[in-house]
Image (cartoon, rainbow, N blue to C red):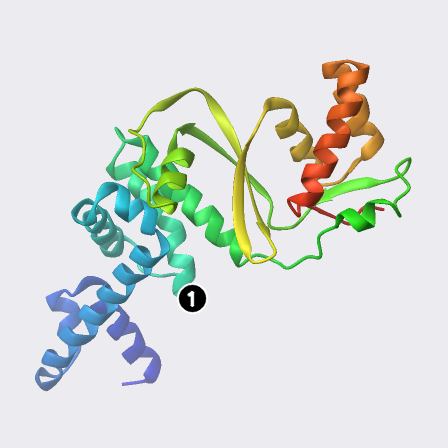
Amino acid sequence: MSLLVLQSDFRAWLETGSAQASSAFAPEAQPGLLVYQNNYRASLMACLEESFPRTLAWIGGRAFRSVAATLIDARPPDSWSLDHYAAHFPVALAKALPDDPEVAELATLEQALTEAFVGPDAVALTADDLSHINWDTAVLRLVPTARMLTVTTNAAAIWSALASDQNPPAAAALTTPAQLLIWRAEYTSCFRALDRIEDELMGDMDNGIAFVDVCRRLISALGHAEGIMTAGNWLGRWTTDGLLINIA
């Protein structure tokens, strides 16, 4: 038996545990196969529990592990790192718990925060940098870990309460979908809600938008005085939050 065939047969056993897959191995190997399969499933279960602690706390161990076991049965890992396996879990939750949409959204938020934490590094602008910038030509760009997430429930409030060891609110649908901005500031993953205007600007800042265009759009939406004031306030907040890079 070649190494490739052995690896293929062993993977088939880990994924299915079927009698057909087991028959590829000698009788004396059977007890050891059970140990390996148990370790395989336990490793995937531990990966999901460690990746989604807030979701686990929200729905409880029994419901969490039921969905996780179904995912493990249906979908083996497809990457060299177990870190990537967690990305499949929010979809599995959405399918398993369609009447509880906050669960999948909570897991999606947790996964997005994890991805931000391990995302590309970048040197964010500081307040000291702002005085050296030509604002007539400056282009605003977001750090590479920034992304937007649409939520239809109060999953963000649930996450915040659980992260603070407080009693979470009851699940509730939002009157209108909300946009969350997720990013990493130094060594901390962060998120906050955006209003409609800031959300539209963030979408353009992902590819770069001139600061003068930011000012024009805010003036158009809010009037001259309030638009200029908002542009200055938001620029200060974006800088404090560690959101901006590559102003040129």
| Residue 1, above or below 121 | below
Residue type indicated by callout 1: Ser
Q: Position of residue 141 (x, y in %)?
A: 73, 43
Q: Can I make out residue 206 in this image?
A: no
**Residue 46 shown left or right of residue 151 in the figure:** left
Q: Quadrant of residue 131?
A: top right
Q: Position of residue 237 (x, y in %)?
A: 68, 38
Q: Quadrant of residue 47?
A: bottom left
Q: Nearer the viewer, residue 32 or 202?
A: 202
Q: Quadrant of residue 78?
A: bottom left
Q: Can I make out residue 74 in this image?
A: yes
Q: How many circles with numbers are drawn on the protein? A: 1
Question: Residue tagged by mark 1?
Answer: 81
**Residue 51 shown left or right of residue 245 in the figure:** left
Q: Nearer the viewer, residue 46 or 154?
A: 154
| Residue 75, above or below 22 | above
Q: Position of residue 128 (x, y in %)?
A: 80, 50
- Identify which residue is drawn at 41% across, 47% down: 110
| Residue 93, above or below 52 | above
- Identify which residue is drawn at 34% across, 51% down: 52
Give the position of the N terminus as an image quadrant.
bottom left
Q: Nearer the viewer, residue 68 or 136?
A: 136
Crowdedness near tag 1: few (<14), some (14–19) or many (≥20) residues, C-alpha within 10 Å: few
Q: Position of residue 22 (x, y in %)?
A: 14, 72
- Identify which residue is drawn at 25% across, 68% down: 40
- Disc 1 on helix, strand or loop? loop
* The residue positioned farthest toward the top in the image shown: 223
